[in-house]
Image (cartoon, rainbow, N blue to C red):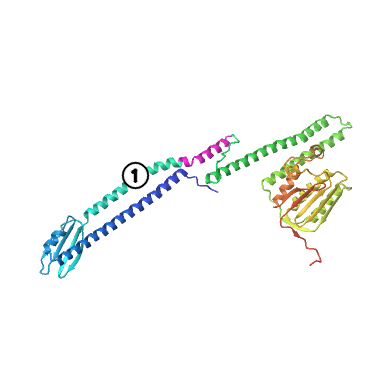
């Protein structure tokens, strides 16, 4: 998106002045046309009235010379052409004349109106309208600059706040008094964006600090064990135990780094592989893996064969994280069930369960409900965060549901379809 960053003040001022100029031009033209039309109508009325009076006077026996003398005034002139060719009255010289002809018997009555005065008045009116219009535009332009500056003051406040935040002064907000106006909605959206950005920044800083703290523990252990191993005599009986501790701490650090990398890939929009994945087959494979690691552990998969388009390796990682968490929560004598249905799958156990207040927090990064136990088992506190990220990348969701016994984690995936069974129609 490329935003045109023209001056809003100049654009508003020029637009208003242009509209005002067009309105004034239309007004001048309208007034001029109206004045000219009314003047022409008035002149026609005067000539018609004078013509009627001339006819009436001639009917009453008045002589043509008397009629011409009575009707000829400052701007009205009358001539009468008699049947014998004599013209009574004179035609005015020069000026702008408008004439009308009336016939009375064999007499031809011609009336002339001098419209020069009207033309001069119309010219003065045009000049007056032009001067007043230009003056109005000039005064309006000055007022528009002041008014627009005050009207756009909230934008200056947004700019100042953005510059202050960019300089490191966090926490400032616009706090609009009204959110039902254009500027109010913009300011509210601006504050919401700042809340989101600053919240994300705080979460990122906290996550980086927590991740550094988590990495420091195994790395410190690796360093201490490695130094002790180097300094220990070759025939020391503790070398095997120190080697075991070194491998364990190195694996713990490696697992944490792998989890951090997986989260970084999810945050960056990691492109998943898209293929048809049989969820029931995936669950049965996870059961086999768990029984290989813990042969006596009670775990089973049940449900209907369904397929979903997604990344089989990532979905297997989700299932493995949920099963490992359930196995750690229940202990060696626990029970874990994986159930596949037409919405996705669930992983349930008979362990202590998850408190209602913690059912959403457990999906935050580096969160442990039993910190000491998870540290001993090598847990990083990132498994559930990664699992939810993978599921949401598939367009679904992972939640911890209410349960009468133990914990139930439900994975809902879109476009889950039954798998056709051989021999069934």
Residue lying at 80% horizontally and 66% vertically, measured from the top left: 424
Residue 142 is left or right of residue 388, and the answer is: left
Residue 110, percent across and down?
A: 17, 64
Residue 294 is left or right of residue 177, and the answer is: right
Residue 421, percent across and down?
A: 80, 63
The magenta stretch spans which residues? 149-167
Can residue 258 be seen at all in this image of the molecule? no
Location of residue 36 (image quadrant): bottom left
Residue lying at 34% horizontally and 55% vertically, measured from the top left: 30
Residue 313, percent across and down?
A: 76, 51
Q: Which of 129 and 398 is in front in this view?
A: 129
Query: Is residue 157 located in the magenta-colored stretch of the structure?
Result: yes
Query: Is residue 153 located in the magenta-colored stretch of the structure?
Result: yes
Please name the predominant secondary structure of the magenta segment in the image.
Answer: helix
Can residue 230 be seen at all in this image of the molecule? yes
Residue 190 is left or right of residue 16, and the answer is: right
Q: How many marks are shown on the rendered structure?
A: 1
Vertical position of residue 308 compared to residue 297: above or below:
below
- Give neighbour class at mark 1: few <14, some 14-19, many 20+ (Cα, 10 Å): few
Name the element at disc 1. Answer: helix
Q: Which of 216 and 23 is in front in this view?
A: 23
- Quadrant (top left, top right, bottom left, bottom right) of the C terminus: bottom right
Q: Which residue is label 1 attached to?
A: 135
Residue 379, percent across and down?
A: 79, 41
């Amino acid at each position: 998106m490329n935003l045109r960053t023209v001056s809003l003040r100049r654009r508003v001022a020029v637009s208003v002045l242009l509209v005002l100029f067009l309105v004034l031009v239309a007004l001048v033209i309208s007034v001029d046309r109206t004045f000219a039309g009314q003047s022409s109508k008035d002149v026609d009325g005067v000539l018609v009235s004078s013509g009627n009076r001339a006819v009436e006077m001639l009917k009453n026996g008045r002589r043509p010379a008397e009629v011409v003398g009575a009707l000829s005034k400052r701007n009205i002139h009358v001539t009468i052409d008699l049947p014998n060719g004599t013209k009574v009255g004179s035609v005015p010289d020069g000026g702008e004349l408008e004439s009308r002809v009336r016939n009375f018997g064999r007499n031809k009555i011609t009336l002339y109106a001098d419209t020069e005065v009207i033309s001069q008045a119309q010219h003065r009116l045009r000049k007056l309208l032009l001067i007043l219009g230009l003056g109005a535009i000039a005064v309006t332009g000055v007022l528009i600059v002041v008014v627009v500056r005050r009207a756009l003051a909230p934008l200056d406040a947004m700019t100042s706040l953005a510059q202050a935040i960019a300089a490191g002064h966090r926490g400032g907000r616009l706090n609009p008094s009204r959110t039902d106006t254009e500027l109010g909605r913009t300011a509210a959206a601006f504050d919401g964006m700042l809340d989101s950005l600053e919240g994300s920044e705080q979460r990122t800083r906290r996550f980086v600090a927590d991740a550094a703290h988590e990495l420091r523990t195994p790395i410190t252990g690796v360093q201490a064990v490695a130094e002790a191993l180097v300094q220990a005599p070759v025939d020391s009986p503790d070398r095997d135990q120190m080697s075991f501790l070194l491998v364990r701490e190195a694996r713990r650090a490696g697992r944490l780094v792998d989890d951090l990398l997986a989260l970084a890939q999810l945050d960056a929009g990691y492109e998943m592989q898209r293929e048809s994945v049989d969820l029931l087959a995936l669950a049965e494979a996870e059961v086999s893996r768990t029984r290989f690691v813990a042969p006596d552990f009670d775990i089973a998969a049940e449900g209907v064969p369904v397929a979903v388009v997604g990344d089989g390796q990532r979905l297997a990682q989700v299932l493995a994280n949920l099963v490992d968490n359930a196995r750690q929560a229940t202990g060696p004598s626990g029970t874990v069930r994986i159930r596949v249905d037409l919405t996705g799958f669930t992983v349930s156990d008979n362990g202590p369960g998850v408190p209602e207040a913690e059912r959403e927090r457990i999906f935050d990064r580096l969160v442990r409900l039993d910190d000491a136990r998870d540290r001993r088992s090598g847990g990083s506190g990132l498994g559930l965060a990664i699992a939810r990220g993978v599921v949401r990348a598939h367009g679904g969701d992972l939640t911890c549901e209410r349960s009468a016994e133990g914990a139930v984690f439900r994975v809902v995936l879109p476009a889950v379809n039954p798998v056709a069974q051989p021999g069934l129609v």
